Image (cartoon, rainbow, N blue to C red):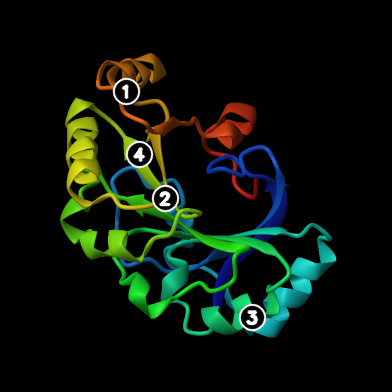
Amino acid sequence: MKVNEIFLSIQGESLSTGFPTIFVRFSGCNLRCSFCDTTYAYDSGMEMTHYNIYEEIKKLHYKRVCLTGGEPLMQKDLRELLALLEDYIVTIETNGSLDLKSMKLDNPKHSFVMDMKVPSSGCSDKMLFGNFDELRERDEIKFVIGDKNDYDWSKDVISRFYKKGIITFSPVYGKIDYSEIVRWILEDRLDVRFQVQLHKVIWGPNKTGV
């Protein structure tokens, strides 16, 4: 498994926002989104076994882990790592372009955060909408919104494909006024969760390892 970084911080996104979390950032991604804030994880990293990763996680004491990237589902030993993390609360941040049928999550402590790429990302045509069939109530579906077209696209996707899970709308940092998205949500009476990227509010948009 190729790992870019392992660090302890607070979770800046998802339902675990604000909780101390151990982040394992894997290297490599099959997409190149226009607003990607982790381009440094495209290639650079070091090879580690799932046992090595687990040992590093144990050193950080907390029992909440976020597997992110890059794209975690590209790592061939991910299932073996999840087995070692059976007693941990684990979220897997995936980009919506890889088939979730290949990674069934049986542990109730483990869940997906599926990031559906909107048109302004340049990768919306890579999304696998069949993945909505694989999500459970505890999984999350995230739409990162950069403009009104992104919002309308997301709303259409929800109306056509949504079945289960918690839906989150999040603004592209520095690109759109937060109040605009909130106004659209309320006007359309959408039952979605709005979030900001808390880590960027605290440390700024360019700080890594947080």
**Camera-side mark, 3 or 4:** 3
Q: Position of residue 171 (x, y in %)?
A: 38, 30
Local packing at callout 4 (Cα closer than 10 Å; few below 14, some 14-19, many 20+) is many
Q: Which residue is mark 1?
A: 185
Disc on the earlier residue, 3 or 1: 3
Q: Which residue is mark 4?
A: 144
- The amino acid pointed to by label 1 is Ile
**Camera-side mark, 2 or 1:** 2
Disc on the earlier residue, 3 or 4: 3
Q: Which residue is mark 2?
A: 165
The residue tagged with tag 4: helix, strand or loop?
A: strand
Disc on the earlier residue, 3 or 2: 3
Q: Is residue 28 visible?
A: yes
- Indicate the quadrant where residue 149 lies: top left
Q: Position of residue 173 (x, y in %)?
A: 42, 30
Local packing at callout 2 (Cα closer than 10 Å; few below 14, some 14-19, many 20+) is some
**Camera-side mark, 2 or 4:** 2
**Camera-side mark, 3 or 2:** 2
* Quarter that holds the N terminus: bottom right
Disc on the earlier residue, 2 or 1: 2
In the visual, does 3 lie left or right of 101? right
| Mark 2 and mark 1 residues within 8 Å of each other at the beta carbon | no
| Mark 2 and mark 4 residues within 8 Å of each other at the beta carbon | no
